[in-house]
Image: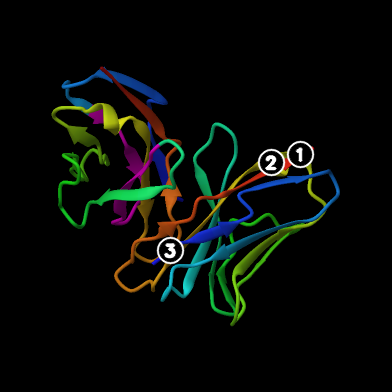
Amino acid sequence: NAGVMQNPRHLVRRRGQEARLRCSPMKGHSHVYWYRQLPEEGLKFMVYLQKENIIDESGMPKERFSAEFPKEGPSILRIQQVVRGDSAAYFCASSPSREGLDTQYFGPGTRLTVL
Amino acid sequence: AQRVTQPEKLLSVFKGAPVELKCNYSYSGSPELFWYVQYSRQRLQLLLRHISRESIKGFTADLNKGETSFHLKKPFAQEEDSAMYYCALITTSGSRLTFGEGTQLTVNP
């Protein structure tokens, strides 16, 4: 099992551009979580998705940010019109279910730099 | 709302010395507590969770509900233990992990 995959690992965008971050969960995992880590801070929850459904997006900024987890393909975190404050490491995690509070397995992260 | 606090951003010990990484939490219910570790250039990985009651790589953590703490301990630190350690909790009704800000442990030779 290759583990949770994220790409790209590093992404540079200019202010106003769009950023698309991809996450492929572990095989057999249907639950995906996105976290953001700002410099010098811990990871903060953004959104929790199952296939084709957003379950909890309470940690996601109301504007410019969106997430999806389609029936086929990876989960996508999309940031429109990026600003310097969006520079951070974005981590994806997956779990097989929520039954018994399954362990979340993390990807290597995408480091977004906004110039 | 739940909160996790790791009071030490940096902790430095010598090889063979005992180490304790502190973690306190606030939550009115019964959370599940975790320790995650991130070694240099590697991804975040689960070290242990309180429900398992197991020792991983010589580390143990006991949930103290009275003090709302989940400190991570190891009696004899090794150089390969040098890493960033994050304490986290999840509520029984929720799905999100709430992380502390992390403690960078350095074990000196």
Q: B80 left or right of A65?
A: left
Say if mark 2 contacts mark 1, CB within 8 Å. yes
Chain under numbered label 2: A
Chain under numbered label 3: A
- The residue wearing badge 2 is A87
- In the picture, residue A59 is in which quadrant? bottom right
Between B72 and B98, the residue placed more toward the observer is: B72
- The residue wearing badge 1 is A84
Q: Say whether residue B36 is magenta.
A: yes
**Residue type of the residue flagged with mark 2:** Ser
Most common SS among magenta residues:
strand
> For numbered disc 1, what is the local secondary structure?
helix
> For numbered disc 3, what is the local secondary structure?
loop
Q: Residue at x 54, y 78 (%)?
A: A51
Q: Residue at x 46, y 39 (%)?
A: B41
**Residue type of the residue flagged with mark 1:** Arg
Between A31 and A7, the residue placed more toward the observer is: A7
